[in-house]
Amino acid sequence: MPRTSRFLPLLLAVLAACAQGAPESAPSARPPNFVVFFADDLGWGDLGSYGAPVIRTPHLDRMAAEGQRWTNFYVTASVCSPSRAGLLTGRLGVRSGLYGDQARVLFPDYVGGIQDEEITIAEALRDLGYATGMFGKWHLGDGPEYVPTRHGFNYWFGIPYSNDMMSTLPGREERRAAFLDPKIEYWDVPLIRSERDEAGEIVTETLEQPADQTTITKRYAEEAVDFIRAHRDEPFFVYVPHSMPHVPLFRAPEFEGHSRAGLYGDVIEEIDWSVGRILDTLEEEGIAGNTLVFFSSDNGPWTAFRTQGGLAGPLREGKGMTWEGGMRVPGLFWWPGTIVPEAITNEMGSTSDLFATFLGLAGGAIPDDRPMDSLDLAPVLRGDGEGPREEVPFYRGSELYAYRVGKYKAHFITEGEYGLAGERTEHDPPLLYDLALDPGEQWDIAADRPGVLADVTSRALQHRAGVAVAPSEFDLRTGR
Ligand code: MG
């Protein structure tokens, strides 16, 4: 008793101070944490909340129910490397050089990659005092100068490029057949750990080669959980670009037969598990209310792989193309207590908008010394304003193939990919679709709406006139 009474006045004083300070200082005292999941080749229609008929994604569906499910959310390119560049830099690949007209993505022996002049979200947030960790696939260059720890991340655990690169099999047919019965040793992809200390010293090591892809989804999640626990008392940015469901498909033994939708379904359900693992961690650590979690995919489903690719839902085509199925992706935002839940958010958004959105919420600003393609979506998330995005460009390499203004989209050029959907075709007049009535781009209304077509075309030309195309990093290949 005496001991308790000695400390009681002090305890009461501390509690009183906390009670007074909490309502005003707690929300603004610390900027929010950010967690970004970026699946690889996951389709618009692969999540329960987006209408997947068989695959079960309870954790992602929870994000949709408690947060916002955006139905007009886009990436900046229909393939891996330029799409990742758009998310991380808030700029179109044509501005940063992270695109190619001959090579559409970076391959292991290429010399190009993200340049030092580019500013990633990770760099901008680290300058504001954030701990920055990345757990997954990079694909913005695999030379030592391009390692994520040189571009804003303090910590990286993951693979440098796609999980189907560095094939160990000799012939085209054997390589193709390998996807149907994938084995770890068929792809000699390294699993890398890289750390950057306070002084900027970087230590990079290859942990495995080939990476054990059966446990890779799980290990990205567990590494991210450890990072979140270690940095729970400071603001953090955690980027989880899963290597799955890009083929070859692998999942942990406990997810074999987990889904009724076969191997592909198992892979998606394991990704969903990883999301649940991290949401649970945020709640256990008491920081869910101060963390914005975002989930999306780098491009549409790789339909050339048929039953090993996902679904684009009602959207046309998939990966590699500027039809909606290639570039419209799931966009889930979750931030309990801050995001105003909406069943469907119809506003347009792009992964390139994360830069301005996050920097705004963190109390920073986007760079003003270069053109950015990033708009602040926070008013929509908070439910106190209109969406700022009215237009979406659809690039393939350096060329503008299509352009969306409001609900209308004009295609100037269409082209298939991976043996699907036809040859390159220039359209004069352009094709025009009303995406509100026709998200599947089935009914060309160009002849019925000449005024709309003229308006969309002129705004596309205006956009184009404002873009200075940088030299391609991907097309350098081995020539630098
Ligand atoms: Mg991809």
Image (spheres, helix red, strand yellow):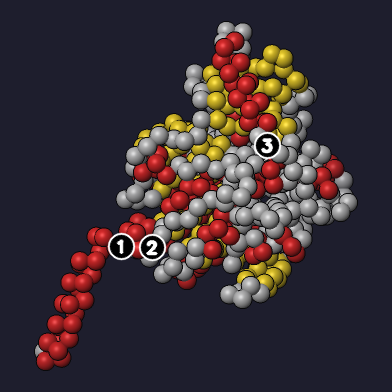
Residue where numbered disc 3 is placed = 467
**Residue 15: where, in percent of width, then height?**
20, 73
* The disc label shown at residue 30, or none: 2
> Which type of secondary structure does the marked residue at label 3 adopt?
loop
> Which type of secondary structure does the marked residue at label 2 adopt?
loop
Looking at the image, the residue that sits furthest to the front is 369
> Which type of secondary structure does the marked residue at label 1 adopt?
helix
Name the amino acid type tagged 3. Val
Foreground of the two, 246 or 452: 452
Name the amino acid type tagged 2. Arg
Looking at the image, the residue that sits furthest to the bottom is 2
Q: Is residue 441 left or right of residue 189?
A: left
Q: Residue at x 36, y 44 (%)?
A: 382
**Residue 116: where, in percent of width, then height?**
70, 58
Residue 63 seen: no
Pointer 3 with pointer 1, Cβ within 8 A: no
C-alpha separation, residue under disc 3 versus residue under disc 1: 42 Å
**Residue 119: where, in percent of width, then height?**
62, 55
Q: Residues within 10 Å of mark 2 (few under 14, many from 20)?
A: some
**Residue 60: where, in percent of width, then height?**
45, 46
